[in-house]
Every structure is written in C-alpha cells, then in structure tokens.
Amino acid sequence: MVPMKKGRYFSTKSGNSHVVSVNASSARHKSSKNNMSRKVPPHNKPVQRYASNEKDYIFWCTKCNVPLMEKGCNTCEEEGRKLDLSQPADVRFCSPYERGVLHELLISLFESDPFGERVILLNKIPGDDKVDEVIVDSLVVGILRFDMQKMDYILEPSVSGAQILLEHTNLKTVVLKKTSKHLNGKKVNYDIVESISSDVRESDIVLVKSGNLVGFGIAYCDSMNASSVNGPMLRVRKIDSRQISLNPKVSTMDDVIAANVSHIRTIGKNAINTIKGIANQKDYKNLPVNVSFSGGKDSLVVLDLTLSALKNRKVQAFFLNTGIEFPETVEFAHKYCKENNVELIEKKAVSDFWDNVDAFGPPAKDFRWCCKICKLAPANAAIEECLAEAPTCITVDGKRRYESFSRANISTSEKNPFVPGQLNIFPVKDWKAIEIWLYIYWRKLEYNPLYDLGFERVGCYLCPAALSAEYQRLKVLHPELHSKWESFLMQWAKKNGLSDEFIEHGLWRWKELPPKMLKLCDDLGISSSAIASDSSFTVNITSGISPCKAGGYSIEASIQGFSMKRTMDFMNIIGEMVFSEELGLLIVRTDSSSIKIFSTGSIVVNSENRETADSVFGEVSRQLLKAHKCTGCGICLKVCPVNAIVLEDGHVRINESCIRCGKCTDSCVVLKYAKKFS
C-alpha cells in the first residue's frame, strides 16, 4: 500500500496522474488483519431489499359510510368490511386542493361530480410522480395522476367509477353492441360500436357500455372520424357486469371521528406511554427532551403527544430552518409554539444553500448535498449544545415507516448513527397518514396551511424529493421563489447542454435518471445524454491519515464520477450499512472502523489506528472501483458460495447475505485490469 498523502489515490485515467495499481489478491477480506465484520445471516432466508407494510388494509362501515381503522364502528357498533389497499397503504384524506382538482376534472370531462361533499380518501401508489387511488364509499373509483408528459392532472376512472359516472352522464362514452366475445384488454373496430358521444377525442379515456357490462377504455380516434378508421378505434381496458352505486348516506368528518374515537384514543395513549417509558428511564429521566419539529403534520402530532406525556418536564421544539423552507412553514412553526407556550429552538445553516449551489449544481434525489449543509451541520451544532449539559440528548421524532422504504424498518427508539449522542424516540412509527389526520382533527390542532394548498408532505420548496405536481404549486403560491430557482436551473441546463424541456419536466431532480425517467425522455424526444457527469472514476485523497479529536485516525477523500446507487450495491461486502436518504449519507461499519460516504462524493474513514485506517481505505477504494466500473459480466455470481450476488439492470448488487469472504473480489476482471481502464 502506498503511503497516505494528499493527492490522487485511485484513478482509471491514464496520463500524468498518479495511478495506483491494484493487486486483486491483496483485496481479499481477512478479518485477522482488517477486523472486518463477518456476521453470517441464515442462507435459507430470502433477503428483501425493501420492506413492505403488513397492515395494507383498513375497514369501512357501510351503515355509517365511514372508513374505520379497526373492525368495529364506535357509532353503530357494527363490524365494517375489510378494504384492501395497494402498497405502501399510507392512505389519507383528500385535501381541499385535491378535492378541487378532482372536481374540475369531473366537470370538464363529464359535466358532473357525483362525489360532491362525500368523504374521499387518497391512497398513494407507485408511479412517475403523484399518483393516488381515489376511494369513495369504500370503492376505488379511479386514479388521480399527475402526468409528466402533459405536466397536468388526469383522471382514470375504474370500473366502479365508470358505473357511477354513467348514472350521471353520457359524455366521453362509447356504447358497444352486445357480444359474446371477451372484451377485457381487447381492441375493437367501429363495426361493433352502437354509439359514440361527439366529445370523444383521440387518446381520451372513455366510459364503455356493452349490454349489462360497464367499464372504461382508450379512444384511438376522434368520434367524428370513428366510422372511417381502418382498424381499431378503441381499446377496452377493463369491463364487467358488477352493479355498483353510491351509498345513500353522505357522512362528514365529524362522523368519521366519532366512528374511530376509541382507536384514536388508544393509539394516542400507546404513543404517550412509549414516550414516558423511554424518557422516564433511570438513565434518561433528568435529561432535556427535544421534539424534532419540522412544521409538518407528523411532527405536530408528536409535539402534542410529548407535551401530554411529559407535563412536568421541560420540552423544547427543535426547528431546523434550512433557509429554503416555505414561508408558511416558518411562520407556522413560530406561531404554533408561541400560542402553545412551547420554547422553539431554531437553528439555521451557517453555509447558505445559495452559496453552494453553483459549485454543486442542483440537488437531486440521489445527490442530496443540500441536506448535509442545510440540515446535518445545524443539527449537529444543536446536539453539541445539548450534550454540553447532558450525556445524551433525547429527541422525539415523527418518522413513520409508511413514508418510504428507507423508513420501513425503524425501531421505537434508536441512537442516531448520523448525530452521535442523540437518542431518537419514534412514537408514531406505525401510524398511517389517515391516523395522523384523525388525531389532528380529534384534538383540533392547528396545522400547516400548505396541506390544504396541494402539498402531501412539507419540506424545502425546491427539494428534489418533492413531486413535480407540488413544484407546480410553488409557481402559483410563490412566483418569486419559483422564478429564482427556475432561472438557476435554466442557466445550469444551458451550461450542461440540456434543453429547457429537461427542466420543465422535472428531470433535474436526478443525477442518474431512473428507467422510468429515461423512458419519459424517449417519449418526449428529450436528450438526457448530457446529464451524465465525467464518467472517469477517481478517488482523490484530500486529507492523509491524521488523528481524530474523538480518538483514532481518519482519512478524507473525494470521488469523481460518483454514484450513490452503485456504491450501495457493493458496500455490503465491507460491512453493515445505514443509509439516510434525507441526508444523502451512507455509513458502513466494520468491527474497527466506520466509513461515511456522502452523496457529494466525499468519504471519511475513521479507524482505531493508522494501519487499519490505511487498510480499510484501500479496501473501500477497490470496492468503489468495482461498483463504478462493473461490466455485469457475472463472473462473481459463480464464485459466491452463498448466492449473495445478483445481477440487476446489467449491474451487480451484493445483498445482506454476504459473508465477506472476498472470493468475488479475487475474481473481478475490473480489479485485475484496473491499470488498463482509460
């Protein structure tokens, strides 16, 4: 191993750069030398990359016509029927803005809104952007989707929705002659069309009738041209003979709360007991308690629960102001805490977002440098202040496992791997969004007005994790903020050879475009080739081995041509991984070392001694090279003794079954011929 010094350590470029050769045999993982973790999981247990939510259902009382969180209804005391939900099953109430969007679409398409003032639920499902199942009277009546091509909302009725709509309209309708042929998924010609409404246009989603069958489909032509089309004029998406209508009872939100009141009380009491049980333990009962208060719905509920749980104890609200928060959020956080006599500790980033964006470019879902600067730094500063007076800082947090895959396995309490000294309590980790809102309505809590204005989640106004549908709302609510950010994005796009359409369709939100966005580019004829940064891969040491203030030794480096996704695909071979999507930070732990890899491409290796730091850094560099130059040849799959390696989309991924034997490293063609990459 070469001595550690500032400069280029690892490179796949040729020329005058210092290129360090790699001997594949030296890359073997030897626990006696490197003290690498060798935890061996059971091999007969399938490894899941993402967790799913087991409780993918709610209930519905058909008598009171309200959703239920438990089977029994508190109002009529009858049992509701089970309503299965699509994953991730984080169902919520339709907001006033979303209700307005739905109403406008129904009126513009069908000149009728049969759902009126009924309780409407939205269940988020996977898609390109904002996609929700629309649930009315326990029926999934359609899908409300923000279309990334049109950059606007569209409504796709379901069979149930089509049956209900056809009771109120004859627009956007195709009536087919009765036939014994199977129609589901079939294309049909004009010769079996009995009638077609004059408002049908090519690509419209239309209501379809055929005898007692009702469903929906897609028109392949305008109604005026239907008779002259040579070939199919309609594709039937789905059709059946179910007889469905709306419940005669129209319930209110008060009815929903009354029907669920015992459940709300129970989950609230359980959450309070969780907070008490941890915060009042012998080692923690005299420590200060902070609530992570973002101004969002989940942290609002957690703040209320904590105040109820610890009435005779000082509770502070901790608000991280990134400098790019919505004005409504900042105002709400201050106003709510003032009106409820809660001390608000506001922390701001020392380094401003706008001071760094020229150097880093726009943040992305897979490149969240902004979180490190605007969140992690002030959070650490606040915790350090807290730890100056106590050995541990207790923080009550509103994270829920239904929010994302990365939060699916959170525990009730955890020591924060990203902020040493902080103990986090997650009392609402198992709550669905609808339960959060039921609690808010039941307790009559004032909440952030952004939720009524088109935002499902509240965060920074230019956050890449936000939906394009929500970003469009920024343009309406705060045109000056939108204009400032849009101006930067356009300049950045021009500088990098990208089109205005690339920005318009929200493609700046990824450093590496996922398959669904690459397809969108193809469909729209948008070039995405320029987004790829310099594909050459280098690891440049920025700070040689040096003593750490906290003990041990560290090495710092930066990566050019970095991909967090590919890095995560390989780092199980080094040690156990913890990833924070919000912070853009991956931590990999071995028995003797910790490796922090930031989405900016920065690496920090901390080890017990100089020799271990040197060895671990070298091993991390080799695995990073493997990850970024992997050709998908599949040789490593054949040598793995525990089948811990899979090939996905032409790239290798090493899963949690890895026993770190090093056989895949020994066989890697990339490492064997590292010098020859150019």
Image (tube, rainbow, N blue to C red):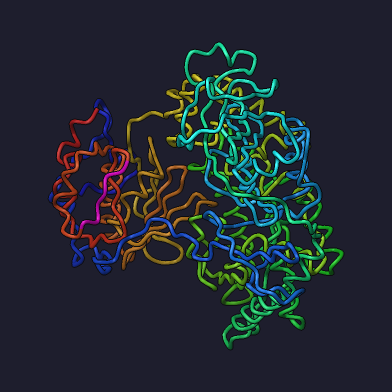
* Residue 391: quadrant of the picture: bottom right
- The reply to whether residue 352 is visible in this rendering is yes
- The reply to whether residue 478 is visible in this rendering is no
Viewer-proximal residue among 135 and 383: 135
443 falls in the magenta region: no
Location of residue 206 with respect to 447 vertically, above or below: above
Residue 181 x, y percent position in the rendering: 45, 34
Q: Quadrant of the C terminus?
A: top left
645 falls in the magenta region: yes
Location of residue 431 with respect to 480 vertically, above or below: below
Q: Residue at x 46, y 27 (%)?
A: 531
The answer to whether residue 284 is left or right of residue 587 is right
Viewer-proximal residue among 572 and 305: 305
Location of residue 104 with respect to 31 vertically, above or below: above
Residue 532 x, y percent position in the rendering: 42, 29
Q: Residue at x 66, y 45 (%)?
A: 460
Q: Residue at x 55, y 48 (%)?
A: 125
Task: Give the residues in magenta.
Answer: 643-648
Q: Residue at x 75, y 45 (%)?
A: 99
* Residue 163: quadrant of the picture: top right
Q: Which residue sits furthest bottom?
A: 282
The number of numbered badges drawn on the structure is: 0
Q: Which residue sits furthest top?
A: 228
The answer to whether residue 677 is left or right of residue 481 is left
Residue 403 x, y percent position in the rendering: 57, 56
Viewer-proximal residue among 446 and 71: 71
The rendered magenta stretch, by its main secondary structure, is classed as strand
Residue 405 x, y percent position in the rendering: 49, 55
Q: Which residue sits furthest right?
A: 339
